[in-house]
Amino acid sequence: MARHSSGNSNLRLSKSLTITVIALIAIIVAILVWALNRTPSNDSSAAESSDSAECIAGDLTLPVGGDSTAAASLIESFNASSPVTRDYCVTAEYVGSDQPAATYVFAGSRSDAASALAETGAVASSSEASWPQVGSAQAGIAVAEGTDPASVTLDNVALPVATNSGVAAAVALALADDETAAAQALSRHAAVTATGASDAEAFATTEGAELPEGYTFEALDGVSVPVWAISAIAGSDISEDQARAGADFGAFDFDPGAADEEALEQVLTDAQSTETEETQAPEAPQVSAPSDTIINLDTSSNMDRVVDGTQESYHTVVSRILSDLARETGSQGNQVALNNYSSPLNPGVTRGWRANVSFPDTSGGENAAGAVVRLGTGGVPLTRAAVVAATQIAREGSPEGQPMKVVIVTSGSAGEYSDEAFLNDLGAAFADNLSLQVVHVGHDPVDTVLSDFATSHGGSFAQATTTEQLDAALRAAFAL
């Protein structure tokens, strides 16, 4: 019997199969949606995992000291880079000028920065010549109330060369007709300090510096001074990791700005030459005769500065001269001892001076001559404590009261040794058969308390900034 057609196509899917296909499509779509939504989450987790891996040691605060105005923008730039040091996530933070810091920021010349650092008691981890310029600070003039800024000229502005040489040089160059006029003005103001300048109707300063009451800051267009970053060594208040982060801060790729350090240093050098020509330094007085001698040598970072008219450091030139003089006086039968000083450079060390060659010495000066040329430099000049120690050693080294010279080579005095305490201690260590022969090297302020004591107790004082002056002053100190 033949089949009859139902009228429906045999190719049509059954209802159950249709539902199955739709369900499979829905599952595939759900999987794709889940996968797409999961990707950003995985990326975020990976990034978080990466950050955690970089900072496995945790977080570390980097204390920054010095000039608050100069430090603010540097800290912001540094932190924005999400710095990592020794597996620590580092955050720089300004701690003020009276708190220990791992790195310091100062505006001005290098010597200004060195002096400012010395006042903090911190010790730089690198030489002054290696400090990086990390920015530029706006320079200008502080104008007293009632003074028209437009009336301020090179003739009536005070330039605090003695304490703020960088901004003094920048303002002098801005107001002078040429470099020669600027150098002459700086020479005339060589002894002016920031405190003394604040009595004038206008004085050179930087933006953000504290001003006396009644003064306002007026910026000079295009005039700026360098900003320096100085990392400090670790100590009781600064960990090794913080010290390392401080070094990384200085090595960061900051914009140094437009301040021209070379131009400022050149005009300051020219000013010093002008001053020397106008007021010839007196010759160092000759002492009676050669005698047993203890050399007390400054080996602070200040001695890394370059001797005028040369490319050699004060440390190199002075060490060479002292080596020759030690042999010369030793050949005449005199004993020669040697101390050097700066500030404690290693953890656990509490005094800033060291005895390298002691009394009695029968080497004819050879021991001191060899030792002095092997000394390195670093730290700040804790001169006063070292002088007291050397004077006591000299007194004990001459029990029979024979003449004894204490030859003191100094770049200045840092630290918190008060005048009264210093004079009391030095007076107690001193004896009538001793004489202090003080040779101040370089252009930093002279410790007049020390120089006055020396000259009023049978000794001498001389300042030297050239190779010729150094040789003459030291030879006179040895009476050779």
Image (cartoon, rainbow, N blue to C red):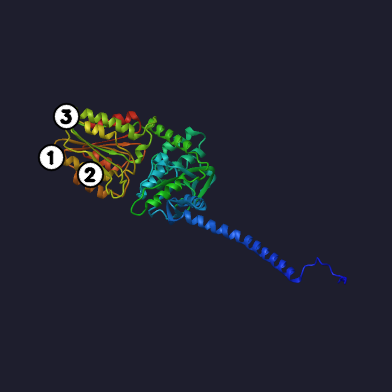
Q: Earlier in the sequence, mark 2 or mark 1?
A: 2
Q: Quadrant of the N terminus?
A: bottom right
- Is residue 64 toward the left or the right of residue 456 in the image? right
Q: Check the image and report above or below for 364 versus 346.
A: above
For the residue pair 99 and 200, the one nearer the viewer reads as 99
Q: Tag 2, which secondary structure?
A: helix
Q: Quadrant of the C terminus?
A: top left
Which amino acid does the dot numbered 3 rest on?
Answer: Gly
Q: Quadrant of residue 304?
A: top left
Percent x, y of residue 90: 46, 54
Mark 2: few, some, or many residues within 10 Å (few <14, many ≥20)? many
- Is residue 31 toward the left or the right of residue 215 in the image? right
Which amino acid does the dot numbered 2 rest on?
Answer: Ala
List the single residue furthest toward the front.
1
Image label count: 3
For the residue pair 433 and 76, the one nearer the viewer reads as 76
Circle 3 residue: 333
Is there CB contact under 8 Å for labels 3 and 1?
no
Q: Check the image and report above or below for 440 versus 117.
A: above
Percent x, y of residue 123: 35, 46
Circle 1 residue: 399
User: What whole-number distance in Å separates the C-alpha atoms at marks 3 and 2?
Assistant: 24 Å
